[in-house]
Amino acid sequence: MATIAPAPSEKFQNVLEASGRSPEIPESADVYGWLIGSWELEVLHYKAADVSSLGIQGEVHFGWVLEGRAVQDVWIMPRRSERTNHTDKSNNMYGTTLRIWDPAIQAWLIRWINPVTGHREEQIGRRIGNDIVQVGARPDGTATRWRFTEITHDSFHWIGESLNQDGETWKLEGEFRAKRTQG
């Protein structure tokens, strides 16, 4: 079988990005495509602390990748324009999520990593009512739930929670308000 080598000047981003959703993903299963683009973040809660008074701003960027079989994002906090080599790791995020449609389970496989802190998650994502809900567990077994709520074309509310040891109540760990950027 012959392989096609990319042109020597081909950029990695051009090989990774896709122009849209693969036809292998049914339109009814496309729960993340509406996110494609760039968003400004208002950081309300991070690492189980109310940080709303600090005025931390962030950004997130979403795009189709891998021939349209996945949606990848990059979550950045603080914004790139505000980052320095001395940014405190306690409120620092520059990580990525890969969401891949799995027709066998009729859901999205989610993988998140923030190399700044080593934080990683594995989840399964589905639409539940008007929300997108991702549930899974951390490597230590802690159950997690991340939700996109109050979804409009130009905004969403993102809530990240972990299950308390009582196995019944959820603890707020992260909360962002997002607005789509123009352009």
Image (cartoon, grey):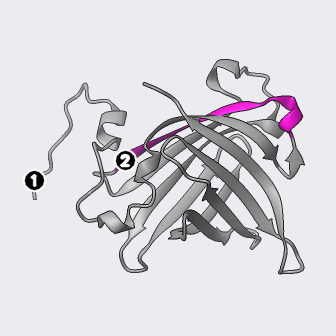
Identity of the residue drawn at 80% across and 46% down: 46
Q: CA distance from mark 1 to mark 2?
A: 27 Å
Q: Main secondary structure of the magenta part?
A: strand
Q: Quadrant of residue 40?
A: top right
Identity of the residue drawn at 42% across and 62% down: 100
Amino acid carrying mark 2 in the image: Trp
Q: Quadrant of residue 78?
A: top right
The residue that disc 1 covers is 2
Q: Position of residue 3 (x, y in %)?
A: 15, 50
The residue that disc 2 covers is 64
Q: Position of residue 128 (x, y in %)?
A: 55, 71
Q: Which residues are magenta?
A: 51-65
Q: Position of residue 164 (x, y in %)?
A: 86, 72
Q: Is residue 182 magenta?
A: no
Q: Is residue 50 above or below residue 77?
A: below
Horizontal placement of 36 versus 18: left or right? right
The answer to whether one can see residue 138 in this image is: no
Q: Quadrant of the C terminus?
A: top left
SS state under label 1: loop
